[in-house]
Image (tube, rainbow, N blue to C red):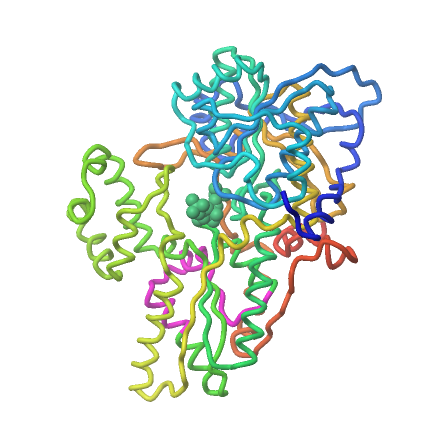
Amino acid sequence: MKKSPLQKARAAYQPKLPIVLTGAVKAVEGKPTQSVANQEEIRKLFPNTYGLPELKFEKNSNPTAGKPVNVGVILSGGQAPGGHNVISGLFDGIKKIHRDSRLFGFLMGPGGLVDHKYIELTSAIIDEYRNTGGFDIIGSGRTKLETKEQFDKGLEICKELGIKALVIIGGDDSNTNAAVLAEYYKGIGADIQVIGCPKTIDGDLKNECIETSFGFDTATKVYSEVIGNIQRDCNSAKKYWHFIKLMGRSASHIALECALQTQPNICIISEEVEAKNLTLDDIVANIANTVAARAQYGNNFGTVLVPEGLIEFIPAIKKLIAELNEIVAVNADKVAALSGNELESFIAGSLSAENAATLKSLPANVARQLMLDRDPHGNVQVSLIETEKLLADMVGTRLKAMAAEGKYNGKYSALHHFFGYEGRCADPSNFDADYCYALGYNAACLINAGVTGYMSSIRNLVKPSVQWIAGGIPITMMMNIERRNGADKPVIQKALVRLDGAPFKKFASQRDDWAMNTCYIYPGPIQYFGPAEVCDQPSLTLRYEHQGK
Ligand code: FBP
């Protein structure tokens, strides 16, 4: 494979491990745990893996010789920078246990386990991918592991390859599936451990014990670089309003982090929209008022950050989506048999009067996307909804009305952008390169400790990496019961932006200034080589959340 000079230099980077993982470790048990909510229901659903203790690794001065172990690894869901380092850390970790250990990568996501598609990951392959972005080493996919048939097919291939442990690298849904799989294998005495790793650029897989998911740091740095570039262009020509949608599915962590890094004129936070019970019209009016206020000072330009999940947080639309989900789930056979206009009229005709009215108030293309586009987990495919264009157009219409009333006399010219895929496969920042390598290496330590149903956990992340704390968190501890596809399911609770959290408070305390005055910050590209304050800083979200700790 031909490599760029940066790729060559990056390949030589040795990720830093927490000091505790640089030698032999022993797992020290904490107190038994319980799920974040619905304790009794979750306990019943996970009789073999509920209530396990948290684990922390400490130095072991009396280690015993390890035995070779065969491990399978799966990349699940959307790409996130650093996945290759999780795999290289895992590889190095199991080789440290015993040099004859072997690592098998299942191809194109969880489907590879079910369909028995895999490759053996040798050191020659691993070395090609160290510190690189992407998931192309084995590919990723969104097949949901949830049926007994799938679990049994997985068991078959594990037996054939002598695999004793599976590591699933994924987001909240994939780690929920990891917990279900762990419970199933333990329940039937299959003697296969299942370990999860917290991945997603969205930043919504975090809690008391998992400080951040990997990929968030790099992706937000990439988006912030480009937002900064746009802001500088915008401040040079002073003639465009830029509407920039940012990936992140439901939660607005990415938009908030990018706002903190770049100080745009406006950033919408979906969780606040919901809390304040705003309508789409309210949001449009707020933006139009800022555009008009800036125009009074001759500033006919600006930037607006829009989180990907905005639409589903507008309370009326949220209600509509909940009923749409229910209709699609309850009539699964009929929905599968219909398509196009027929499917649309069936779904629209099944709605309550209130929700039908909300649907009618939306532009036709948005209404169609809400009705028809779902991913395999049943989620509305928010990344397909062009909210940035919708808002830019609606603001334009409103400004015309304001001009007619003599309330606006500026020039409005809008451009729109969507940043998502641009950041998901970037070469990991030093933070993500180190964090991911540690997560993978630590997963090997959890395998060596013989546990199952745990998520690899590396904490104390605002401190230098040598001081990071390594251990394992029972996945059931993060679960609650939620309505999914028309049924109550045990799932990992998604972390949304907390309006009482330090990152949002910081943003809220400064946004009025950013709206009227041009306070743009231009973060520039990710730096891999140079002073630590330029190269090794974790995200502002993480720093504000853990300030003083
Ligand atoms: P994960 O939750 O699987 O990490 O995926 C995150 C994400 O990048 C979201 O931000 C986005 O909405 C979605 O994936 C896009 O999905 P796809 O890659 O299938 O287009």
Magenta span has 280?
Answer: yes
**As displayed, is residue 404 above or below residue 194?**
below
> From which residue to which does the magenta span run?
262-287
Which residue of the protein is positioned furthest toward the right in this rendering?
61
Name the residue located 26 percent from the left edge and 48 percent from the top edge: 371
**As displayed, is residue 100 above or below residue 137?**
above
Residue 64: image quadrant is top right
Image quadrant containing the N terminus: top right
> Where is residue 344 drawn, in percent x and y?
19, 48
Name the residue located 39 percent from the left edge and 19 percent from the top edge: 148
> Where is residue 129 drawn, in percent x and y?
64, 39
Residue 82: image quadrant is top right
> Where is residue 183 drawn, in percent x and y?
49, 20
Magenta span has 276?
Answer: yes
Which residue of the protein is positioned furthest toward the top in this rendering?
189
Q: Is residue 494 visible?
A: no
> Where is residue 267 drawn, in percent x and y?
49, 65
Q: Which residue is at the front of the view, 224 or 468? A: 224
Q: In the visual, does 502 lie left or right of 60?
A: left
Residue 376: image quadrant is top left
Name the residue located 71 percent from the left edge and 54 percent from the top edge: 537
Name the residue located 65 percent from the left edge and 46 percent from the top edge: 432
Q: Is residue 163 visible?
A: yes
